[in-house]
């Protein structure tokens, strides 16, 4: 009976209906690309980006008209253990900064004509301390996942999920440790700027959490509820909703990729619509990207979060589309094609 289905089972059922890429649209893009006034392959990954968009949108002429950065914000009970250089109150303060237009992500989105929405996830009620108990109950995690799925409502045609939450690099590091093994030190970074003592404390807390939940970490959704945060659950929902709707996704950095990594562990095809917007120096982000099979579009040493690296990459996607759409062909420009 459907009434006997648990919340996580509903999420698993969604993964059974992932749409395939549209090969006809990709073929059409390649035909036009062969006619443009340039040597074959001369634009490198810009050409791949357009094919990626066509495959997902199912259009011979892909377009990006309503790109969105969706920033999900949540608080973490583990922050009380001193795993961050800033107090948990900064999460709400930064949300106010987003609203007033004062954050880096505001400037990047304005520069490239990208929409920005901020989703506040019960900041007054932090998740439980993962080093002492499960961070969330199953219903709580599933409900937040479902809420994140709403991020693509309204005709979004390119999504960049971002996050804000003091303590969330600890949650991400714990997730990577659970998925890929090894002590916390293998995955953690300094987050918001921890000194050596703070970093050692952070590693100890994460190792404590991994030990506490050992034996319950074979299921990625259990990893989410035991070690994750609301913003990670919501980003998982947003990424999966985009996959089901044929909306391409640009992944941001260290924390956003924790959401992608959990989906990837459930089904590798679940993030087949994602490109990595950038590589972050935070923790072992490069290692994670390799495990996900994602080569970053940008490598600028950014570790801000907020969806900032992915938002910058949207500018690159727009440039790729402009070249494909607006370049002259050899015939229209009267340029001789390749001989021999």
Image: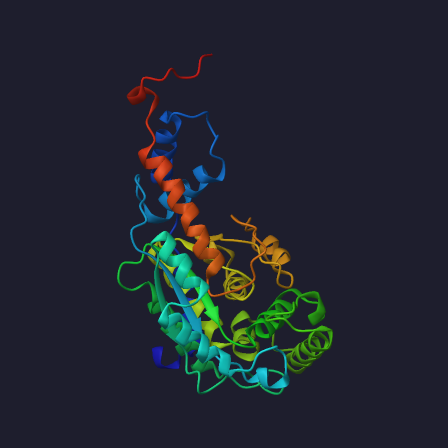
At a point 42% along the width and 55% down the height, the residue shown is: 249
Asked if residue 165 is positioned above or below residue 13 in the image, the reply reads below
Residue 115 at x, y percent in the picture? 33, 60
Residue 8 at x, y percent in the picture? 45, 75
Pick out the residue farthest to the left. Answer: 154
At a point 31% along the width and 58% down the height, the residue shown is: 156
Image quarter for residue 85?
bottom right
Residue 318 appears in the picture as rendered: yes
At a point 53% along the width and 53% down the height, the residue shown is: 278
Q: Nearer the viewer, residue 238 or 284?
A: 284
Tally of numbered discs: 0
Asked if residue 20 is positioned above or below residue 11 in the image, the reply reads above
Residue 286 at x, y percent in the picture? 62, 55
At a point 73% along the width and 76% down the height, the residue shown is: 200
Q: How is the image coloured?
A: rainbow
Image quarter for residue 191?
bottom right
Residue 16 appears in the picture as rendered: no
Q: Nearer the viewer, residue 168 or 137?
A: 168
Image quarter for residue 22?
top left
Classify the position of the N terminus by image quarter.
Answer: bottom left
Residue 213 at x, y percent in the picture? 63, 80
């Amino acid at each position: 009976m459907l009434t006997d289905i648990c919340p996580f089972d509903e999420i698993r059922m969604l993964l059974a209906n992932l749409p395939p890429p549209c090969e006809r649209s990709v073929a059409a893009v390649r035909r036009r690309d062969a006619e443009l006034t340039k040597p074959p392959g001369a634009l490198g990954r810009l050409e791949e980006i357009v094919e990626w968009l066509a495959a997902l949108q199912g259009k011979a002429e892909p377009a990006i008209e309503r790109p969105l950065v969706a920033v999900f914000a949540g608080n973490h009970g583990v922050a009380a253990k001193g795993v961050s250089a800033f107090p948990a109150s900064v999460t709400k303060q930064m949300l106010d900064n987003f609203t007033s237009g004062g954050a880096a992500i505001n400037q990047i989105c304005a520069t490239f004509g990208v929409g920005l929405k901020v989703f506040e996830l019960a900041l007054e009620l932090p998740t439980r301390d993962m080093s002492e108990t499960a961070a969330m109950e199953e219903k709580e995690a599933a409900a937040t996942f479902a809420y994140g799925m709403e991020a693509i409502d309204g005709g979004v045609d390119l999504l960049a999920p971002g996050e804000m939450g003091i303590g969330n690099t600890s949650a991400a590091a714990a997730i990577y440790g659970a998925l890929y093994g090894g002590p916390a030190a293998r995955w953690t970074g300094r987050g918001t700027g921890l000194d050596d003592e703070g970093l050692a404390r952070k590693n100890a807390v994460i190792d404590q959490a991994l030990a506490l939940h050992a034996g319950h970490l074979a299921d990625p959704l259990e990893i989410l509820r035991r070690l994750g945060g609301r913003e990670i659950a919501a980003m998982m929902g947003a990424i999966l909703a985009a996959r089901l709707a044929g909306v391409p996704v640009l992944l941001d950095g260290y924390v956003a990729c924790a959401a992608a990594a959990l989906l990837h562990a459930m089904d590798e095809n679940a993030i087949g619509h994602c490109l990595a917007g950038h590589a972050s120096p935070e923790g072992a982000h490069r290692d994670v990207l390799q495990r996900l099979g994602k080569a970053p579009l940008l490598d600028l040493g950014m570790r801000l979060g907020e969806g900032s690296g992915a938002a910058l990459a949207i500018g690159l996607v727009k440039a790729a589309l402009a070249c494909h759409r607006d370049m002259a062909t050899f015939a229209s420009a009267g340029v001789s094609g390749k001989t021999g």
